[in-house]
Image (tube, helix red, strand yellow):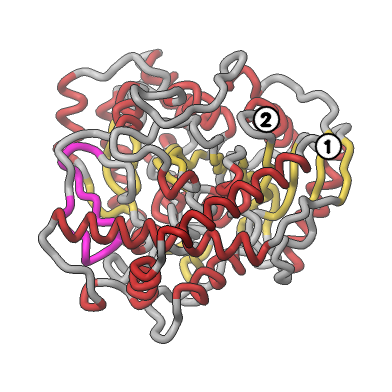
Amino acid sequence: MTKISDYSKFDGLGLADLVRRKEVTPRELKDAALAGIEKVNPHLNAVVSVLHEQAEKELDSGLPDGPFAGVPFLIKEAVLHAADVPLSMGSHLAKGLTFPYDTELMARFRKAGFVTVGTTTTPEFAYNATTEAVFYGPTRNPWNPDHSAGGSSGGSGAAVAAGIVPIAHANDGGGSIRIPASCNGLVGLKPTRGRVPTGPDYGEPLNGLGIEFALTRTVRDAAALLDAVAGPDPGCYAWAEPPKRPYLEEVSTPPRRLRIAYMTRPLSGVPVDRDCLKVLNETVQLCSDLGHELVEAAPQIDNERHMLATLRIWTANLHSMMNGAAHALQRTPSRDHLEATSWACYQYGAALTAAELLEALDIQALVSRAAGRFFTDYDVLLSPTTAHPPLPLGVLNANAEGVDAQQWTEQIFTYAPFTNLFNTTGQPAISLPLGWSSTGLPIGMQFAGRFADEATLFQLAGQLEQARPWKDKLPPICV
């Protein structure tokens, strides 16, 4: 493979196939990825650490014969960690933090054959729908560098969209896989709670709101990756019912006629941009043309109570995470090394009582029951992923003074009012790049399925990808 542009045409399975057929070596792919970082990262600020020496050691030690053997890979600097690799979580408070061991999911990524070439940006402690940490500076959208790449996995999203790697680690505690998928024109699956291992550090991250996975350019890469990494790890808190067959097989399996509900308004009632509604209406028509039944409907949920629960769970966990990082590095959390809204969330979390947190968990359970009842009548719920196309940089300013924890949470979920519900319920949800704004920015559509039913989502996503292909649409900033 002589040109980076040739490298960037392939998805992860495509590159792995080239390696298997000996048309390219893993080292050549690693070099192409590093050349891609050098070429486009100065314009995007998506990659933080370049792990050249670690990648060389992985290659020298021999790669496992996994489905992605030899494929370059990036990991987000939050939650998941690799041995001796920086985990700054986008914060001066956590600067220099490393762990001497891989998390279970990182070990499974290695077993799948990936070669880790670097780490990607995140907003501070991953609590923002854009990636503009003071610690790193803003990460830019490869479709328009004046706009956000989304968050909190914005660095991974920008890197995959720009062709640096075909797949990058991401995680999602309120939309952080799906939002950057929408902003960057990618596939973003948040798997079912308990589908992907979270050990050995966590039982249920964010009291069940958080889950780890990745961002991809194609549906088949997401399916093959979930096949490779899913399943319980020893001593796990809970796990999702295993699939009847490999997810990769579902991608090429036409779905039965599905009953799909669609939402034009979020549960919060905040307005939705006309471009997002236009793409939603086009998607409703496309699904109907493909033979599915479409019904405008939404679950009945007390959004105000739901957001109160989200605020309490997030701030309690932010307080714990910040204290953990500070303790490991012998620091004390303060405004001196935290952004303004992070400090506000830390203080809010510190003031919470155990009874208030337990009440939040009870609210989450009630919300899950209401959504569960809704999904007895519908196979899938369709909505825009975000209420607006990618925002200009600076709109969601986590370092703005005078914004308290509740106001900050409202700002995040005013921009992304559709995603958080499925972190609460634990249901699988996927964002697909099915449209574009009038100014040429990607717009994702979110499809949520029943608990543990990624299979139906993969069947539908494969059908939609075939009907409206997106893989070859490349942004102006691309390797």
Specify the farthest residue to the bottom.
402
Disc 1 packing (10 Å; few <14; some 14–19; many ≥20): few
Q: Is residue 26 above or below residue 292?
A: above
Q: Nearer the viewer, residue 321 or 288?
A: 321
* Residue matched to label 2: 462
Percent across and percent down for residue 38 are 28, 52
Task: Please tell me whether residue 173 belongs to the stretch shown in magenta.
Answer: no
Q: Give the residue at x 53% y 51%.
A: 361
Answer whether residue 41 is visible to the viewer in this image.
yes
Percent across and percent down for residue 384 are 70, 55
Quadrant housing residue 219:
top right
- Dominant secondary structure of the residues highlighted in magenta in the image: loop
* Mark toward the start of the polypeptide (1 vs 2): 1
Tell me the SS state at disc 2: helix
Percent across and percent down for residue 201 are 29, 39
Res. 377 mark: 1
Number of the front mark, 1 or 2: 1
Q: Is residue 395 above or below residue 358?
A: below
Q: Amino acid at mark 1?
A: Asp
